């Protein structure tokens, strides 16, 4: 094994880990010298620099590494999504944690960087055991981040997240062992080769694949594996939720697409109406339907905006599973585009919610009353985020949903008859219903009057954390090819190159 | 001046208004007026050019947009869409004039207003189904905001109901379009391409009703019309004018230029049902209008009735019927704008009531003679008296009905009679009340202002012009109907 080549290949991850260690050192030194914890602004600057450095380091990673390991890959999909995950992570860092919640910002941001490292490693591997290890590195950091504020609610959220996560990790690992038993290999391309020939999987391998899908369903907060989501979204620090909702979810989607399309294309079956065949396509289709119905219906009844966003996360997972269940490369590319766009919008909505919460004390719908008078910037940003989630043009969420549904429908068409009409139709109707609960928030912000209209002061980085995703959503809505083409092409190249 | 200036002026106007500094918010209405006049002039110039050189190469703008799905940014206009652009331009100018006195958050008001106008222009100009859908959906949120923030009676309820119906209709349209796209091979959303594909009859018979109903809901098809009266009543005047005048026309336009050409066989199967619903809508809307106490509700339900004529014209699948339907879109757009403008702005601003009985106490024909005069003309136009635009449109639709479904002409005639009844009743109660000599004389009300007079004059003169000399409009519409899109429909009966 060539260790210097390995180091170059892991340069982005190395930069993140070094930054995290540096951050811990600086935090300890400052606390020992002054007796006070390190200022939040300083940790934000250090972590952002680290992430930007990791992004730059990504350019030096060779496409065909000479390190000789089969654990890591740098295919086009990995490269694109490492950059995207770093971008989403940078946004999460920019959203400052509330001062009264986080006493030690140094440790908090260091953990955040470790989580990001895990997510990066997860994206860049086709070896299932390494995938599990990387996923656990990310998850363990995320469990801690979820409970970092040491409030009762955060503790509950963290524990729930940990218990559900632990069980699903067990499922995932057990599923992998069954798949290994059938294929005698742990890398996805080799598995795909072992499955070639079109004979159906034996029962235990099917059980294995189901378990793997369940494990990833938890990561993506697909119903019925979503029970952790509302409590985590509500109880955890906003910054942690932002990372879980955006970066971690995007990684979950990448892993799912990689696993199913790259490894188990032969075991897809079909979810097309009238032509249904057992296989992951059908399971994912059912998960999608359940998630869309569950998420949207339960979101209607929420009065806490964070819980509302959690159920909206479940619903949005449903939409992207629709596209994945179509078993087409363009549809899956569209799903990966959507998960990024969704992440930006949810992140932005959380950033606004965090600002409102810090000023008003809670995240109930009523706290948003008259936001447009208190802070026009926040109100307009919220309008952009929620409209994008609801699928209103000209924002990226609209394009994402339309492209996903169009590509899913066209991938499932045989003899001029689209097979996924039942699922896409359900998605379109559910998406229409979702406008109601997003409008409930917007109604408070724009229509209702506030008791007092004192303007809100926000830190620079918090403002950036709203401005950047808002601008990106508008730009990607007007010019979706900027992101859709690279993502789709990366996926196509990766699938062809296996 | 290409038709694209309609679109550009509207969105540029919206953006400029938003960027105004807070202390010069008063300029918002000026910017909106300039932008909407620019749009109207651009549309009128394009119409004139088309009439003078009917065979000149049509303007179009076409560039790749989302290559993964074969989506293009494709704008073009034939005579039919040009005539609807001009309608939009005229209603937009009148709408700004009728909103001259908006003082609550004027920048946001005019930005939302101009966004709706831009979206409507966009729908009429789009030749790509995805692009059309984008513009169609752009108007949803501004509609909600206009009604919920600046509206009156029950505004939050009316706004939410209207918005949910709109988004529901969009969901149906999305399903229909995506089915058409996928079944056609998943390569292009171009409307002409989709219309040229021969879909399997079994697919058409379930996909057509989904797509048609999607557009039909926005077109106020009975029994999915209930959003229209509540929404129009709750909306501020300019929004009522836009909603009834042009936004409902988007539904009819989509049904005519998207749903019917894409699935012509499905249309052939379902058109009797559509005709039936349209006739029920005509009579139901008119009868309901006959019993309303609120002047705006009378106009709201009359819109449902008039939209029924449009849908009926489409269902006849004859040249007379289609051309009459488009003419009715234009005529109703002008007349509904006028009626809502007078009832919601001119009268309500001065009397603060829209209750027919309460209005009687103001003795409006003496105290506000200008409004009474204008409303009388508007009522005549709405009833379809000769000399006004409604007459030409309804006669044309009637001929189409006679050719396709002769027996349906009877209920249509009943509908026309009831329309006369409710129009006269509302006019009589509100403006020409019977008063006893003993009643105290009502005090004079402030006379009409210049913006009001110019908006009223603009709308009435257009309606009269169409009624007296419909030829240019018919020529434009025929140009659109000659497109290959409609071959399969016009050859049906």
Image: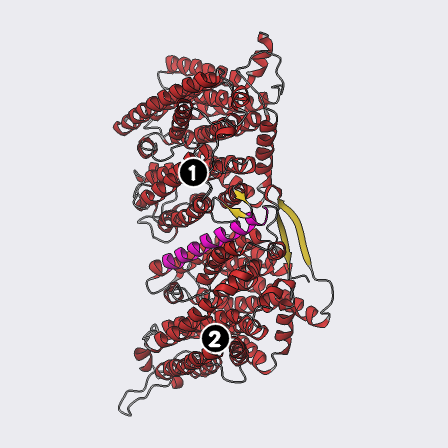
| Residue A285 numbered mark, or none | 1
List x then y, in percent, for residue B328.
52, 73
Q: Secondary structure at mark 1?
A: helix
| Residue B449 numbered mark, or none | 2
Of A487 and A37, the residue lying toward us: A487
Residue at 32% x, 48% y is A452
List x then y, in percent, for residue B296.
38, 72
Quarter location, residue A176: top left
Q: Secondary structure at mark 2?
A: loop
Is residue A214 at least partly visible in the picture?
A: yes
Residue at 55% x, 27% y is A83
Q: Which residues are magenta?
A: B159-185
Characterize the magenta stretch by its predominant secondary structure. helix
Residue A408 left/right relative to A433: right
List x then y, in percent, for residue B338.
48, 74
Q: CA distance from mark 1 to mark 2?
A: 61 Å
Residue at 63% x, 71% y is B478
Q: Which chain's residue wears label 1?
A: A
List x then y, in percent, for residue B308.
45, 71
Quarter location, residue A36: top left
Quarter location, residue B253: bottom right
Q: Which chain's residue wears label 2?
A: B
Is residue B344 at least partly visible in the picture?
A: no
User: In the rendered structure, does residue B435 fall within the stretch colored magenta?
Assistant: no
């Amino acid at each position: 094994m060539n260790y210097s080549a390995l180091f170059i290949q892991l340069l982005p991850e190395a930069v993140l880990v070094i930054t995290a260690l540096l951050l811990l050192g600086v935090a300890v030194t400052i606390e020992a010298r002054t007796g006070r914890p390190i200022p939040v602004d300083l940790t934000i600057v250090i972590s952002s620099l680290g992430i930007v450095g990791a992004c730059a380091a990504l350019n030096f990673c060779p496409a065909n590494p000479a390190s000789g390991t089969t654990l890591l890959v740098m295919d086009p999909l990995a490269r694109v999504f490492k950059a995207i995950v770093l971008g989403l992570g940078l946004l999460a860092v920019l959203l400052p944690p509330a001062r009264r919640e986080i006493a030690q910002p140094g440790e908090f941001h260091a953990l955040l960087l470790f989580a990001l490292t895990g997510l990066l490693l997860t994206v860049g591997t086709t070896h299932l055991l390494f995938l599990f290890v990387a996923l656990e590195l990310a998850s363990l950091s995320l469990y801690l981040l979820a409970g970092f504020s040491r409030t009762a609610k955060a503790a509950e959220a963290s524990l729930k997240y940990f218990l559900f996560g632990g069980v699903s990790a067990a499922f995932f690992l057990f599923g992998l062992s069954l798949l290994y038993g059938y294929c005698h290999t742990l890398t996805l391309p080799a598995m795909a080769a072992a499955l070639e020939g079109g004979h159906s999987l034996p029962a235990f391998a099917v059980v294995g694949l189901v378990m793997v899908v369940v494990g990833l369903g938890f990561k993506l907060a697909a119903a019925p594996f979503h029970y952790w989501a509302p409590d985590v979204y509500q109880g955890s620090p906003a910054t942690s939720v932002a990372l879980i909702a955006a970066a971690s979810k995007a990684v979950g989607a990448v892993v799912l697409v990689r696993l199913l399309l790259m490894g188990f294309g032969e075991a897809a079956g079909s979810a097309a109406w009238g032509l249904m065949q057992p296989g992951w396509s059908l399971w994912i289709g059912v998960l999608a339907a359940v998630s869309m119905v569950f998420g949207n219906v339960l979101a209607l009844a929420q009065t806490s905006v964070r819980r509302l966003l959690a159920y909206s996360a479940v619903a949005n997972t449903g939409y992207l599973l629709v596209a994945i269940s179509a078993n087409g490369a363009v549809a899956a590319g569209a799903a990966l585009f959507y998960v990024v766009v969704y992440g930006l919008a949810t992140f932005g909505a959380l950033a606004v919610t965090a600002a409102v919460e810090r000023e008003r004390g809670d995240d109930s719908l009523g706290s948003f009353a008259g936001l447009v008078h208190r802070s026009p910037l926040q109100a307009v940003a919220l309008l952009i985020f929620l409209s994008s989630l609801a699928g209103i043009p000209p924002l990226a969420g609209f394009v994402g949903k339309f492209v996903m549904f169009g590509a899913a429908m066209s991938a499932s068409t045989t003899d001029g008859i689209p097979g996924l009409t039942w699922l896409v139709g359900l998605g379109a109707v559910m998406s229409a219903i979702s406008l109601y609960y997003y409008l409930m928030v917007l109604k408070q912000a724009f229509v209702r009057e506030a008791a007092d209209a004192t303007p809100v002061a926000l830190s620079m980085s918090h403002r950036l954390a709203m401005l950047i995703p808002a601008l990106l959503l508008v730009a990607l809505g007007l010019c979706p090819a900027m992101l859709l083409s690279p993502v789709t092409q990366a996926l196509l190249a990766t699938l062809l190159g296996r | 001046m290409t038709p694209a200036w309609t679109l550009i002026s509207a969105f540029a106007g919206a953006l400029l208004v938003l960027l105004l500094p807070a202390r010069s918010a008063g300029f918002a209405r000026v910017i909106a007026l300039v932008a909407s006049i620019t749009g109207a002039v651009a549309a009128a110039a394009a119409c004139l050019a088309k009439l003078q050189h009917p065979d000149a190469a049509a303007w179009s703008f076409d560039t790749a947009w989302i290559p993964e799905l074969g989506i293009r940014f494709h704008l073009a206009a034939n005579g039919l869409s040009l005539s609807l652009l001009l309608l939009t331009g005229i209603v937009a100018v009148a709408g700004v004039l009728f909103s001259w006195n908006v003082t609550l958050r004027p920048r946001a008001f005019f930005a939302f207003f101009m966004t709706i106008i831009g979206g409507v222009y966009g729908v009429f100009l789009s030749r790509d189904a995805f692009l059309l859908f984008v513009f169609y959906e752009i108007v949803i949120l501004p509609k909600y905001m206009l009604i919920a923030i600046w509206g009156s009676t029950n505004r939050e309820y009316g706004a939410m109901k209207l918005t949910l119906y709109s988004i529901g209709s969009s969901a149906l349209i999305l399903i229909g379009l995506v089915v058409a796209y996928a079944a056609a091979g998943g390569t292009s959303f171009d409307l002409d391409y989709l219309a040229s594909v021969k879909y399997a009859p079994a697919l058409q018979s379930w996909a057509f009703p989904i797509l048609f109903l999607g557009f039909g809901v926005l077109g106020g098809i009975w029994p999915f019309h209930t959003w229209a009266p509540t929404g129009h009543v709750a909306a501020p005047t300019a929004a009522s004018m836009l909603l009834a005048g042009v936004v409902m026309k988007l539904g009819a336009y989509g049904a005519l230029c998207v749903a019917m050409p894409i699935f012509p066989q499905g249309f052939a199967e379902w058109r009797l049902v559509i005709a039936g619903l349209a006739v029920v809508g005509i009579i139901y809307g008119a009868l309901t209008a006959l019993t309303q106490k609120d002047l705006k509700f009378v106009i709201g339900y009359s819109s449902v009735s008039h939209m029924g004529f449009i849908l009926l014209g489409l269902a006849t699948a004859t040249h007379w019927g289609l051309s009459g339907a488009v003419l009715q879109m234009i005529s109703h757009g002008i007349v509904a704008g006028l009626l809502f403008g007078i009832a919601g702005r001119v009268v309500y601003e001065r009397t603060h009531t829209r209750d027919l009985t309460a209005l009687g106490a103001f003795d409006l024909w003496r105290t506000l003679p200008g409004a009474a005069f204008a409303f009388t003309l508007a009522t005549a136009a709405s009833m379809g008296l000769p000399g006004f635009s409604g007459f030409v449109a309804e006669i044309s639709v009637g001929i189409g009905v006679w050719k396709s479904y002769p027996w349906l002409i009877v209920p249509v005639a009943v509908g026309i009679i009831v329309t006369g009844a409710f129009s006269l009743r509302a006019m009589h109660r509100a403006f020409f009340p019977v008063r006893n000599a003993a009643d105290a004389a009502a005090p004079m009300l402030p006379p009409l202002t210049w913006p009001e007079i110019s908006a009223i004059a603009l709308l009435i003169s257009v309606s009269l012009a169409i009624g007296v000399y419909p030829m240019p409009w018919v020529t434009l519409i025929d140009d659109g109907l000659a497109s290959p899109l409609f071959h399969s429909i016009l050859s049906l009966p």
